[in-house]
Image (tube, rainbow, N blue to C red):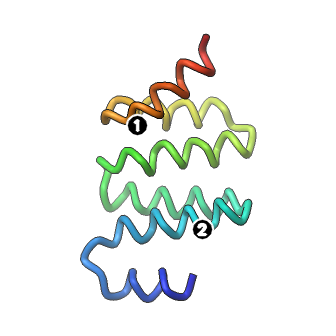
Amino acid sequence: MVDYNKAIEISSDIASFYHDRGSCKGRSDNFKEAILAYTKALELNPEYSLSYRVRGWAKESLKDLKCACEDWKKAAELGDEEAAKLLKEYFK
């Protein structure tokens, strides 16, 4: 986390570091913090489809399927094929 914090301070591609911070939080089962990091990444780069998809996973982990599906739908609209598969899986 210290490295991600420093990278955010000095990088021009800050969105990817917020995304990576979210991934780190998610791997630690800190889904609320992961969602905050992914949201920040998306504020900086609203076309970052992967952040929508993994934020959806974090929301699904917190039993918020409605919001998870909204994120997967947005990711799919941006061309994320894995998100499209998730939507099909949940809405068979």
- In the image, residue 60 sits, relative to residue 42, either above or below, namely above
- Picture quarter with the N terminus: bottom right
According to the image, label 2 marks what residue? 24
SS at circle 1: helix
Compute the Cα span from label 1 to label 2.
20 Å
* Left-right relation of 85 to 44: right
At label 1, which amino acid type do we have? Ala
**Which mark is in front, 1 or 2?**
2
Q: Locate residue 28, reporting x and y percent.
A: 71, 66
Q: Which residue is drawn at the image coordinates 55% and 28% (left, top)?
A: 86
Residue at the image position 49 percent from the left and 38 percent from the top: 71
User: Seen from this angle, which residue lies furthest top?
Assistant: 92
Percent from the top left, x then y, of residue 66?
62, 30
Q: Is residue 12 above or below residue 32?
A: below
Q: Is residue 40 above or below residue 56?
A: below
Q: Nearer the viewer, residue 50 or 37?
A: 50
Question: In what quadrant of the picture does the C terminus appear?
Answer: top right
Q: Which mark is residue 75?
A: 1
Residue 37 spot, x, y in % from top left: 52, 64
**Secondary structure at numbered mark 2:** helix
Are dots 1 and 2 in contact, CB under 8 Å? Answer: no
Q: Amino acid at mark 2?
A: Cys
For mark 1, does the 10 Å Cα neighbourhood hold few (<14), some (14 to 19), or many (20 or more) residues?
A: many
Neighbourhood count class around disc 2 (C-alpha, 10 Å): few under 14, some 14–19, many 20 upward: some
Q: Position of residue 53 (x, y in %)?
A: 49, 42
Is 66 drawn above or below residue 23 in the view shown? above
Front residue of 65/11: it is 11
Label whose residue precedes the other's in the sequence (1 or 2): 2
Relative side of 69 to 78, left or right: right
Q: Which mark is residue 23?
A: none
Residue drawn at point x = 67 percent, y = 58 percent:
32
